[in-house]
Image (cartoon, rainbow, N blue to C red):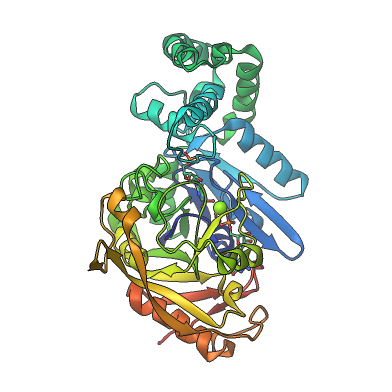
Amino acid sequence: MFTILTGAQFGDEGKGKVVDLLAENYDIVVRFQGGDNAGHTVKVQDRTYKLHLIPSGVLFGKRLLIGPGVVCNPKVLWEEIESLRKEGLDVDIGIDPKTSIIMPYHIELDSLREKARSEKIGTTKRGIGYAYIDKVAREEVQMGDLTDPARLQAKLDEIGPAREKAIADMGGDSSLVRSAPDIDEYLRIGQALKDSLTDVSLEINHALDQDLMVLAEGAQGAFLDVIHGTQKFVTSSFTTAGSACANLGVGPVRVDNVVGVIKAYITRVGEGPMPTELKDATGEYMREKGGEYGTTTGRARRCGWFDAVLGKKSAFLNGYTELALTKLDVLTGLETIRICVAYDLDGQALTYPPEDTGAFARCRPVYLEMKGWTEDITGVKSYQELPAAARAYAEKIEELMDTEITAVSVGPGREQTVFTPQEE
Ligand code: GDP
Ligand code: IMO
Ligand code: MG
């Protein structure tokens, strides 16, 4: 069985929690895009794990893979592996040798460019965009290069001068392109990971041939997709479900399920339009109650009402077969809950987002109001135990996204999840 899970909004929907939950029943969990711009939180009992590159199936000791569509900072990966192993966890990791490496110069270029932009994107400054630029320019360092000093040296001799010039032109320190301590550290990590290199496409296809369970873990969210997101305020990878097939080298007919993770409201980190953003006490309530501060950068996340106009687009972009609704508990205590069901664009009513980001930025939300609830739901053990108003809210989202919600998360813990009744 091959399941793809993606974020349906602007990232931070709770993918880490849902992947951890599902992982118990899977054999392999694989990351297929993005890099350590991702921050996936998994909370089990009193321990909280913040994962950036390691797939969130690690707590169940599953086979973990990093596919060649990921951009990997080896230092972050190695630190993550070591700290998880120190905790006594079995990190059975396989990395594709074609995985692009985020070099120190990518991070420098990302920071320099962001500083120079008059209109900021608010990147995580992890070098993501510049690593993807080099991938498509066919001038990248790959994981396999880190296992062979001569090969890495030859690569850097070939591509180094252009990067040095780019950094110097932006007023940065070009000596870090071929800085010996950094290169030595990358080579040390390459040696340490040499035996973990694997052909990820082959491993997954073989696993599926043997009827094993494979879960592809998306990073970021639909509207950060480099094509379908709110350009230019997006990340640099393809974040929607189809990307898993292309990036992992698995045919689309092998996909069985596509799970969308949606937050009961919406958040965004960094710049870019967000029609339902609340810059008032309700937005503040969501941020504080939901702990909406970035896992990777610590930045305060912008919060707003659930946007079903975006939700519908996300269902189209991903082809979701089911949804996991997270953070419903955060809305407890609000007298009225709003759902954006249409936009007003210069006096015209829209029920689907316009493609042009400028037009999208002018969209004003049209809301449907629903009754809130006051009961504490963080301890409920079944869907039926949820207050009627909370169920009505979930069912409205289901109707507007035309996709079934199968799981509702009512707290960060693994056990704080209820499943909707399924018809036989
Ligand atoms: P991801 O990037 O999609 O994996 O999401 P993050 O981990 O960046 O952000 C989600 C945050 O919400 C994390 O701190 C989770 O522990 C937390 N979380 C996940 N599900 C729930 C939930 O249902 N309720 C509450 N209160 N917190 C949750
Ligand atoms: P997870 O996987 C939320 C945002 C950044 C910025 C834009 C581009 O935890 O959901 P980048 O560094 O990727 O070039 O930044 O994308 N961004 C995220 N926002 N969650 C994420 O990942 C994100 N990864 C990138 O804030 O606006
Ligand atoms: Mg996150």
Residue 308 occupies which quadrant of the picture? bottom left
Q: Quadrant of the C terminus?
A: bottom left
**Relative vertical location of residue 151 with respect to residue 242 in this rendering, above or below:** above
Q: Residue at x 43, y 81 (%)?
A: 369
Camera-side residue of 11 and 211 = 11
**Relative vertical location of residue 159 with respect to residue 188 in this rendering, above or below:** above
Q: Is residue 421 visible?
A: no
Residue 297 occupies which quadrant of the picture? top right
Picture coordinates of residue 169, whole percent (x, y): 45, 13
Camera-side residue of 306 and 311 = 306
Q: Is residue 191 visible?
A: yes
Residue 247 occupies which quadrant of the picture? top left
Camera-side residue of 389 and 92 = 389
Picture coordinates of residue 353, whole percent (x, y): 29, 60
Q: Quadrant of the N terminus?
A: bottom left
Picture coordinates of residue 411, whole percent (x, y): 64, 71
Left or right position of 261 against 414: left
Camera-side residue of 373 and 69 = 373
**Relative vertical location of residue 417 with respect to residue 173 in this rendering, above or below:** below
**Relative vertical location of residue 420 with respect to residue 34 in this rendering, above or below:** below
Left or right position of 239 against 317: right
Q: Residue furthest left?
A: 348
